Image: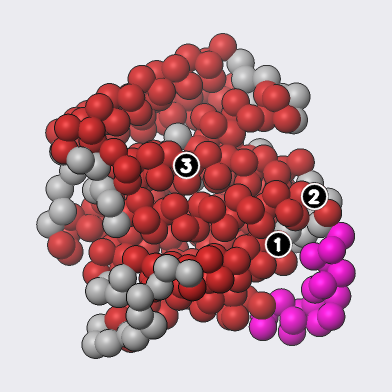
Amino acid sequence: MKDLTDQQKGSLLAFVAVMFITPDSLFIRLSNIDTWGLVFYRGIIPFLSVFLVMLLIYKLNFFNILLNSGYHGIIYVVTFSITNITFVVSIQNTNVANTLLMIATAPMLSAILGAFILKEPPDKKTWISIIITFVAIVYIFYDSIKIGNFYGDILGFITAIGLAVGAITIRSAKSKNLVPAAVVGKLFVAIFALFFIESFTLVEKDLIIVPLMCILCVAIPFVLVTIAPRFIPAEEVNLFFLLETIIGPIWVWLIIKEQPSIETLQGGVIIILTIAIHSFLKLKKS
């Protein structure tokens, strides 16, 4: 890693993180545990595993790093906790493709927030992309209202907003290590779920699926995604989530035959093409 540029480091971290995340939606669908039980385990297992690793690496300095993260750390704990909850509840209340398409808007949302918070205003191409993406989202929302998936889609969009805020927060605090804040965020997720959980019992295939999902699709990626924006812009990190938007629904379709609606496919093609073209033009310019 020492021989890589910041661009290469950030891109590699984001790519590996998203590849670990791609089967996450499938694991959520395959699990039989209730929604809040799933949220609890997706909070407590990554918290314990990453917290123990952090203690081995940083020892008691872990707490100093956490305190030194200041208000950036507080913002990241809040946004990280919210996105971890809304993502699971969204998946449980709409098609996987719908949730992931909402999340695909995170790069555009990061660009908008970056203009106000980081004083990095988007160029004309970015504004055009934002408008086209917004129209496609409205189209998908309209379809979801007709078939009763609106609640899940809204939570998916809230997840995208949370990802954008989190990435901007990390970008604005490049000198700070926010991984400890993310660890605390996972603990908050588990504590919040305790107020709604119906059962802690894991039976049959859940004994394998839930711990595997929590380590491979949650614990490892959240550490990598928290580090990546220290090397590349927030919107570039979120662009890698386009891979999940494409690959995630394919996993679900291949294994459990869940097919998105025509409107979702149409809106999704518009969103993905718009962001892909926008990304290509930016990279070409740079």
In screen coordinates, is 254 left or right of 17?
A: left
Residue type, mark 3 in image = Ile
Residue extent of the magenta highlight: 52-68
Q: Which mark is residue 181?
A: 1
Please state which of residues 67 and 34 is positioned toward the viewer in this rendering: 34
Measure the alpha-carbon separation of dots 1 and 2.
11 Å
Q: Quadrant of the C terminus?
A: top right
> What residue does disc 2 label?
71
Residue 118 in the image: above or below residue 213: above
Marks 3 and 2, the one that precedes in the sequence: 2
Going 36% across and 20% down the picture, which residue do you hit? 135
Q: Which mark is residue 130?
A: none
Measure the alpha-carbon separation of dots 3 and 1.
20 Å
Percent position of residue 22, x then y: 37, 58
Please indicate, yes or no, whether residue 213 appears anywhere in the rendered image. Answer: no
Residue type, mark 1 in image = Ala
Residue 55 sits inside the magenta stretch? yes
Q: Secondary structure under badge 1?
A: helix
